[in-house]
Amino acid sequence: MIMDAKFIGKSKLTGQGQLTLPQEGRKDLKIAAKSEVYWYEFNDVLVLIKELVNPKELANFVFNKKKKK
């Protein structure tokens, strides 16, 4: 399944290293205040997701790699 990227806004990193997740993204993904989110890094790409997943499966999904059988 190929999904198109959707731009939802930008955030500015504070001096304390904090970011604000844009409202549209929070609304679309149903991320409430005090929710936990997870960060993964792949080849200089930072990915934020709302559920903990297997990094290899996430990389396959993000980069559209087909599973080897």
Image (spheres, grey):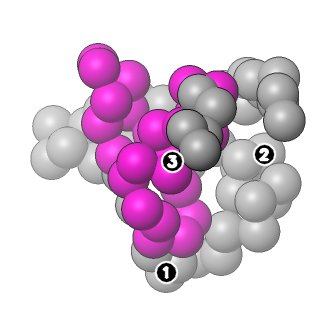
Q: Which of marks 2 and 3 precedes in the sequence?
A: 2
> Which of the two labelled residues, at mark 2 and mark 1, occupies the earlier sequence position?
2
Within 10 Å of disc 3 (Cα), the crowding (few <14, some 14-19, many 20+) is some
What kind of residue is marked 2?
A: Glu
Task: Say how many tags the image has.
Answer: 3
Residue 48 visible somewhere in the drawing: no
Q: Position of residue 50 (x, y in %)?
A: 56, 65
How many angstroms separate mark 3 from mark 2 (CA)?
A: 22 Å
Residue that protrudes farthest toward the bottom in the picture? 34
Whether 5 is drawn above or below 14: the answer is above
Q: Which mark is residue 26?
A: none
Q: Is residue 56 magenta?
A: yes
Q: Quadrant of residue 68?
A: top right
| Image location of residue 69, percent across then percent down | 59, 44
As drawn, the label of residue 24 is: 2
Viewer-nearest residue: 67 or 46: 67
Say which residue appears at 72% left-offset and 47% top-offset. 25
N-term mark: 1 or 3 = 1
Left or right side of 20 for 32: right
Q: Which residues are magenta?
A: 40-64
Instruction: Report which residue position mark 3 lands on.
Output: 58
In the picture, measured across the screen, residue 1 lies left or right of residue 51, that is right
For mark 2, does the 10 Å Cα neighbourhood hold few (<14), some (14 to 19), or many (20 or more) residues? few
- Residue drawn at point x = 29 percent, y = 20 percent: 43
Mark 1, Cα crowd under 10 Å, few <14 / some 14-19 / many 20+, is: few
| Residue 55 part of the magenta-drawn span | yes
Which residue is disc 1 drawn over?
34
Label 3 or label 2, whichever lies nearer to me, is: 3
Point 47% across, 65% down: residue: 53
